[in-house]
Image (cartoon, helix red, strand yellow):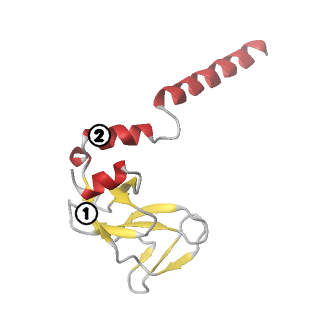
Amino acid sequence: MNQDFEEYLAKKRDLLDAYCTCGGEFKAFVDKNDCYGLCPNCGKKSYQLSCKKCQSGFSFGEDNPIIDKIGNCWTCPQCNEVNHGLPDLMIKLYRNEEIPKEVKKEEDGRTLLPKWAVYLIMGMIAIVYIFIKFIK
């Protein structure tokens, strides 16, 4: 198993979705640093960025209009803060089929709510909604 997968399983890194302007969707193993990876489909950069002001995290392809490579900055779409400096830390982006089963299982366990709990809550909300409509 490679180092990215081992560090994720040891809870030293997070697994995030990464996107490219070519339409590619990948997985990125990141720590708290901003970074970029090269898209396995087209070879362009896909940035993993977090805003210094609002702490929101994003994944953008290098052709996205919020990225200003000439000014070496990007604008947060959440709070409009201009963040100076694009990352120079390069990571590897993985296709979904490259992720081992152990990592996918761990990822499912790290979600905030299990899928069954989400369905249970949605069902309860639907029952309450129907009940309220029925009483009126």
Dot 1 corresponds to which residue? Answer: 39
Q: Residue at x 37, y 69 (%)?
A: 35
Q: Residue at x 68, y 22 (%)?
A: 129
Q: Is residue 25 visible?
A: no
The percent position of residue 55, horizontal first and vertical second, equals 57, 64
From the viewer's perspective, is residue 38 above or below residue 14?
Answer: below
The percent position of residue 106, horizontal first and vertical second, equals 37, 40
Q: Circle 2 sits in a helix, a strand or a loop, which is it?
A: helix
Residue closer to the observer: 83 or 14: 14
From the viewer's perspective, is residue 74 above or below residue 91?
Answer: below
Q: Residue at x 25, y 54 (%)?
A: 94
Q: How many marks?
A: 2
Dot 2, crowdedness within 10 Å: few (<14), some or many (≥20)?
few
First of labels 1, 2 by sequence position? 1
Q: Amino acid at mark 1?
A: Cys
Q: Residue at x 32, y 62 (%)?
A: 21
Dot 2 corresponds to which residue? Answer: 102
